[in-house]
Amino acid sequence: MVEHRHSAASQGIQRDKTHAKATRRRGQALEATVLKAAWEILNEVGYEQLTMAGVAKRAQATKPVLYRRWPDKASLVTQAFITYGPKLNPDLTVPDTGSLRDDLVGFFDQLLVVFNALGTEKMQGLVADRLKSIPADKLFGVANDNAIMRPKIETMLTQAESRGDLKLADQTERTLNLPTVLLINEVLSRGELTAESVAAMVDEILVPVFMGSKD
């Protein structure tokens, strides 16, 4: 009986030491530990199976500590990806292949780097969750008034115009914003972006719409 109480007391002291060690971590040290744990689990089980509780356990932290820094799983995993994932080129390049179709495919394929970094299954759901956390009006604002994709699309269309494939002046605001809308819809509805879906969007929708302005 005495030995049992002594063992229980020793275990309690050990738990207290472990808890104290976890709670002593602050700021960047704690953040680095949590992000490393999140990245490891993401690689092991993928985004859908990753949980805040699992990350907290591996990082020897608590869920409230995690939620004070990251409001949801998507925010945490996004930060882990930024920290440990491949360093993406912030400037999307505009291909000039001599074909509007190939230019569009080459341009959108650059976005696949994010999904291919870990494999589609492991990343599936992350981008969708991030987009779902953005109010609908802001999503439409991104599509209708974006400074990232729109200039790139116009450059590709200008290249196509120089080849006599279309008239840029005939394009409307809706058609110029269509690529962004399609990408958002693809990720929200399917939770992923693949080379096959990129090719389908380009071949079935974008090229017919853009080239339809040719006399």
Image (cartoon, rainbow, N blue to C red):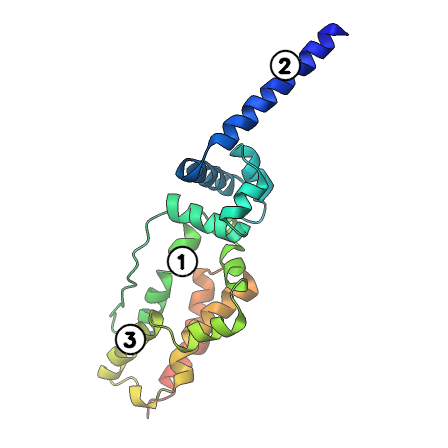
Residue farthest along the top direction in this orientation: 2
Q: CA distance from mark 3 to mark 1?
A: 19 Å
Q: Of the residues under marks 2 and 1, which one precedes in the sequence?
A: 2
Q: Is residue 35 above or below residue 149?
A: above
Between 119 and 59, which is closer to the camera in this rendering?
59
Name the element at disc 3. helix
Image side of residue 53 versus residue 115, left or right: right
- List the residue tagged with mark 1: 112
- List the residue tagged with mark 3: 156
* Residue 46 visible to the viewer: no
Please name the amino acid that badge 2 sits on: Ser
- List the residue tagged with mark 2: 10
| Residue at the image point whose x is 26% and y is 67% from the top | 95
Q: Is residue 68 above or below residue 138?
A: above
Please name the amino acid that badge 3 sits on: Met
* Residue 88 visible to the viewer: yes
Please provide percent x and percent y for residue 113.
38, 55
Residues at discs 2 and 1 in contact (Cβ within 8 Å): no
